[in-house]
């Protein structure tokens, strides 16, 4: 094991002890392994890493191509550089390095992207009607779709739900260790509670009996009676969108985007949405102010001079008269 590999191993062990999520550690391990290979190919030790070296690594990432010939996205480059920056900051803080060479390393500026797709109310209702609620898994899937649409929770948050997290009487759902390992309570509507109760009464116990190693805490179970996996959730839900005639991209996350956009269209305050969605920064939630086209259309209709000049009916009559003459 090289010195850089040993440094990375110590850092990851320390991060695990601090409570970082397993998924975060796995991603960071991959990014740091790539950096280690790059450094070792150039015979660089940890002590030889300088700001200039890191600029060379940044340039290498920018020029790197994937198997299909595409360059790395700005987000991917930022994630890889962030992992290195976190490693070196920790090494300096714990006196494994005399200085932090990444102290002034700037990350790529990420473009502010709008959600790739948002459904209309009618499109969402078509999707919700797709699962066959006469079957055990179809009824479970209907409950899952209703919960996602009602609460806007993330895929991993739904997978992590326990029975005790649903407070049907209060109309609340407790999210344990959401993104950033933060707990929060979100409202859940009566229709989502209704379908979840049907699932609990008719399906869950039967699914639980199928498992040799059941998880009695999990709210949503797989066909084998285990806690449903995130990958399986995506596999199950995407076909419902297709069956509903939805050609827009997306799977689980589309329910989150749709819920937030439709609520904002209906007048929900952006700070309330921030609390429900569990965003650390208000700027993250503000993307929904840009996709709420209904609100913009209403403002346009009320204020644009061309709209105010004449009503559509009178304009149509005028055009008809001109044509006849």
Image (cartoon, rainbow, N blue to C red):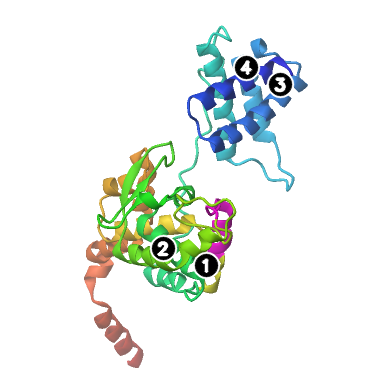
- Of all residues shown, which one is farthest toward the bottom? 324
Residue contact at pointers 4 and 1, CB within 8 angstroms = no
Secondary structure of the residue carrying tag 4 is: helix
Tag in front: 1 or 3: 1
Element carrying mark 3 = helix
Compared with 68, 74 (above or below) is above
Viewer-proximal residue among 158 and 212 = 212
> Tag 1 or tag 2, which sits nearer the N-term?
1
Question: How far is disc 4 from disc 2 in space, using C-alphas?
Answer: 59 Å
Between the C-alphas of marks 1 and 3, the distance is 50 Å
Q: Which residue is denoted by mark 3 in the rendering?
A: 39
Q: CA distance from mark 2 to mark 1?
A: 12 Å
Q: Mark 1 or mark 4, which is nearer the start of the sequence? A: 4
Span shown in magenta = 226-238
Mark 3 nearby-residue class (10 Å; few <14, some 14–19, many ≥20): some
Classify mark 2: residues with Cα within 10 Å, few (<14), some (14-19) or many (20+): some
Q: Secondary structure at mark 1?
A: helix
Give the CA distance from mark 4 to mark 1.
Answer: 56 Å
Q: Tell which tag, 3 or 4, sits nearer the viewer.
A: 3
Would you say the residues marked 2 and 3 are in contact, meaning their CB atoms lie under 8 Å apart? Answer: no
Looking at the rendered structure, which numbered label has been put on residue 137?
1
Q: Which residue is mark 2?
A: 200
Q: Which numbered disc, 4 or 2, marks the residue closer to the eye? A: 2
Residue 323 percent coordinates (x, y): 35, 89
């Amino acid at each position: 094991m090289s010195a850089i590999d040993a440094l990375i191993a110590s850092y990851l062990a320390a991060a695990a002890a601090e409570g970082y999520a397993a998924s975060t550690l796995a991603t960071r391990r991959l990014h740091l392994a790539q950096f280690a290979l790059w450094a070792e190919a150039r015979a660089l030790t940890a002590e030889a890493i300088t700001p200039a070296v890191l600029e060379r690594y940044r340039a290498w990432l920018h020029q790197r191509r994937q198997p299909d010939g595409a360059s790395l996205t700005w987000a991917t480059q930022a994630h890889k550089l962030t992992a290195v920056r976190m490693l070196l900051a920790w090494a300096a803080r714990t006196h494994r390095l005399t200085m932090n060479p990444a102290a002034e390393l700037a990350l790529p500026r990420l473009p502010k992207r709008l959600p790739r797709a948002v459904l209309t109310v009618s499109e969402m209702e078509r999707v919700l009607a797709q699962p066959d609620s006469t079957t055990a898994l179809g009824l479970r899937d209907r409950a899952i779709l209703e919960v996602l649409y009602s609460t806007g929770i993330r895929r991993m948050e739904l997978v992590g739900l326990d029975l005790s997290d649903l407070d049907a009487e209060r109309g609340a759902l407790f999210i344990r260790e959401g993104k950033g390992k933060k707990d929060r309570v979100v409202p859940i509507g009566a229709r989502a509670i209704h379908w979840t109760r049907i699932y609990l009464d008719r399906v869950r116990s039967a699914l639980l009996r199928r498992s040799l190693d059941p998880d009695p805490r999990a709210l949503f179970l797989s066909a084998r009676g285990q806690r449903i996996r995130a990958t399986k959730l995506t596999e199950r839900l995407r076909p419902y969108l297709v069956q509903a005639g939805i050609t827009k991209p997306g799977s689980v996350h589309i329910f989150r985007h749709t819920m937030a956009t439709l609520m904002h269209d209906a007048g929900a305050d952006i700070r309330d949405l921030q609390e429900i969605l569990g965003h650390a920064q208000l700027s993250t939630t503000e993307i929904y102010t840009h996709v709420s086209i209904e609100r913009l259309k209403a403002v346009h209709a009320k204020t644009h001079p061309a709209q105010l000049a004449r009503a559509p009916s009178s304009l149509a009559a005028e055009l008809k008269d001109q044509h006849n003459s």
